[in-house]
Amino acid sequence: MRVLGVDPGLTRCGLGVVEGELGRSLTMVDVGVIRTPAQEPIARRLLAVSEHIDEWFDRYQPDAVAVERVFARHDVSTIMGTAQASAIPLIAAARRGLPVAMHTPSEVKAAVTGNGRADKAQVTMMITRILRLSQSPRPADAADALALAVCHMWRGGAQQRWAAAVAAQQQDRPALSGGTGPRRGVNRKVAR
């Protein structure tokens, strides 16, 4: 499985591609950061982010996409740009029919470090270890993108296996007779 992790932002948007299987070592395929100048108009900045993200989708052909879930902060100007940038990988994935998962920062931190309140240095250190990298990814947005992909591989993969197991169990279960719920193929007349 190959996952594209996106740490959305207008000034810096982190991208990281991780490959592997649940229960096995994961490998970093690539990592990078899209940068846009703050003095540019918002439309041009969003277009630049969109073009770069499309290039990554075309180049790396991910099986799934993991995007950081935007949450409210005190600085509204920062949250607006982040929210706008986070829509871009969602749309790009939808155009390609790819599954998308949104993970909160604390969920990602917990998955990667075991602590939902870990700081950026701890996340970077653990991503460097988990992916067996010779040097830490910089800036933090790059490490965060890889952490999103790893989180999805570990948590999203487990959720997908759980859903598949439940669906298989429901298909194998014989239909219940009598009692609750409608029965298929039976016409019932209601006496009044």
Image (tube, helix red, strand yellow):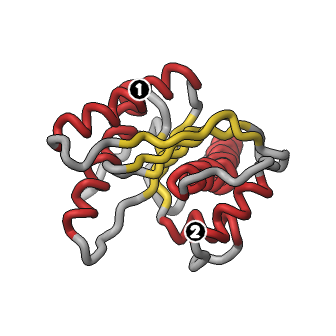
The residue under the point 71% across, 40% down is 28
- Reading the image, the residue beneath label 2 is 120
173 and 109: which is toward the camera: 109
Q: Is residue 16 visible?
A: yes
Could you tell me the amino acid type at mark 1? Answer: Asp
Helix, strand or loop status at disc 1:
helix
User: x%, y% of residue 99?
Assistant: 49, 38
Figure check: 51 above or below 7 = above
Q: Residues within 10 Å of mark 1 (few under 14, many from 20)?
A: some
Please indicate whether residue 75 sits to the left or right of residue 66 in the image: left
The residue under the point 80% across, 48% down is 134
- Reading the image, the residue beneath label 1 is 54
The residue under the point 63% across, 35% down is 30
The image quadrant where one finds the N terminus is: top right
User: x%, y% of residue 85?
Assistant: 31, 46
Please indicate whether residue 26 sits to the left or right of residue 5 in the image: right
Figure check: 93 above or below 103 = above
Figure check: 95 above or below 150 = above
Could you tell me the amino acid type at mark 2? Answer: Lys
User: x%, y% of residue 149?
Assistant: 60, 48
169 and 190: which is toward the camera: 169
**Label 1 vs label 2: CA separation?**
27 Å
User: x%, y% of residue 152?
Assistant: 61, 51
The image quadrant where one finds the C terminus is: bottom left
The residue under the point 45% across, 56% down is 68
- Label ID, residue 181: none
Helix, strand or loop status at disc 2:
helix
